[in-house]
Amino acid sequence: MKHRQSSVLAFVLHNSLLLLVGTAAAVLWANLDLPTYEVFAEPLHFWVNEIGMVFFFALAAKEVFEATLPGGALASVRQALSPLAAAVGGMVAPAAIYTSLALTLGPASLTRGWAIPCATDIAFSAMVARLIFPKSHPAIPFLLLLAIADDALGLLILAVFYPSATLSFLWLFLLLAAAMLLAVVLRRRRIRSFWPYVIGPGSLSWAALHYGGLHPALALVPIVPLMPHSARDLGLFNPREERQPDTLSRFEHWWAVPVQFVLLFFGLANAGVPFERIGSGTYYVLAGLLLGKPLGVMLFSAASRLVGAQLPEKLRLGDLLIVGIVASIGFTVSLFFATAAFPGGVALAETKMGALLSFVAAPIALAVARLRSGRRA
């Protein structure tokens, strides 16, 4: 009985299902009693979006960084070209579709949210992919590599295009340089605990971004590569990853569970949108995700093959289409981009709903996979 309970808990945490719980509670509360929901959610925004999400983006940055180490999936251009091209296509096409719709159908003010449909939610996309493909199928690691590259580009977009205030390069440069210098000193002194890196350089980096005008949720992104880490990446799904003793790995192991509760409160604080707020922004986000993602993934993957990239063995075009549809689940990062793009009002509510409804990509992908298997039979 205890083993079954621990298995269920591990499944919930591994697949970020606490985020779904928080999201469902927020949507239900907002549709039953919006004023009390807003009174509850408003004080949480700072603590969740600007403090708690620091660790969510740090774990995403850790995956991106390790994938670039020797042995990592993104360590060589030839090795990384196909998923990188798919990731770029899966961002360019959604942004183009969203922006075109906003400019032609209006209101033009919605164009500020062009990055919202660019995102891919790693946890939920991977969960759906595992439901569709056998465990050893190359589509699963390909999707994860695509999502990791997507995260890297998403972090860059968030920093460059969505400043949280007026940019102050003096504060940004001075405090960020101090943060990174302190991290280097800690590393040279062979400090193995991750806490000094979080408390010292992490706090300085947070202040640099906050006072410099960038989103402080990215505070640990420049610090993560400076923590002591393994010389090589063991690769996706390698069970030895759980036993790595280096500082960066211990940081991930310690924060993996707390971040799931951060996501619970992130959904609870940000996802409360009444259904009557569905509007133009909702449809533009969904069009960008559901049409743009698979289209961009397919087209840019094809273009990468023209310059020598190859799809993994046994990954067929039909599999790639399903990967593109599964990658349409934007959810967490799309929701975060919506809060960064719009300070509030109708545009925020509409685009948030688009991010939430991107979950319809899951049954669409399952239906396409069922149709393909039926034809093969």
Image (cartoon, rainbow, N blue to C red):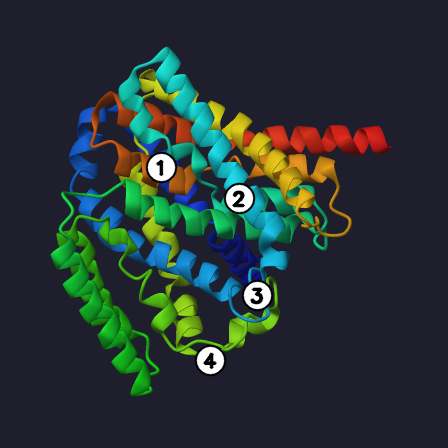
Q: Amino acid at mark 1?
A: Leu
Q: Quadrant of the N terminus?
A: bottom right
As measured in the structure, the alpha-carbon distance from the residue carrying label 3 to the one carrying label 4 is 18 Å
The answer, for residue 15, to whether it is visible in the render is no
The answer, for residue 58, to whether it is visible in the render is yes
Q: Residues within 10 Å of mark 3 (few under 14, many from 20)?
A: many
For label 1, the SS is helix
Q: Badge 4 is on which residue?
A: 245
Mark before the other along the chain sequence, 1 or 2: 2
Judge left or right: residue 291 versus residue 219.
Answer: right
Mark before the other along the chain sequence, 1 or 4: 4
Question: Hey, which quadrant is residue 356 in on the image?
Answer: top left
As measured in the structure, the alpha-carbon distance from the residue carrying label 3 to the one carrying label 2 is 17 Å
Residue 72's tag is 3
Instruction: Give the vertical position of 243 relative to 91 (above or below).
Output: below
Q: Amino acid at mark 3?
A: Gly
Judge left or right: residue 217 versus residue 319.
Answer: left
Q: Quadrant of the C terminus?
A: top right
Judge left or right: residue 343 versus residue 5.
Answer: left
Q: Amino acid at mark 2?
A: Ala
- Residue in the image at 64% along x and 47% along y: 130
Question: Hey, which quadrant is residue 203 in on the image?
Answer: bottom left
Residue that lies at the very extreme toward the bottom in this rendered image? 189
As measured in the structure, the alpha-carbon distance from the residue carrying label 1 to the one carrying label 2 is 19 Å
As measured in the structure, the alpha-carbon distance from the residue carrying label 3 to the one carrying label 1 is 29 Å
x and y, in percent, of residue 71 in the image: 59, 70
Mark before the other along the chain sequence, 3 or 1: 3
For label 4, the SS is loop
Q: Badge 2 is on which residue?
A: 87
Mark before the other along the chain sequence, 3 or 4: 3
User: Residue 292 or 9: which is nearer the viewer?
Assistant: 292
Q: Badge 1 is on which residue?
A: 335
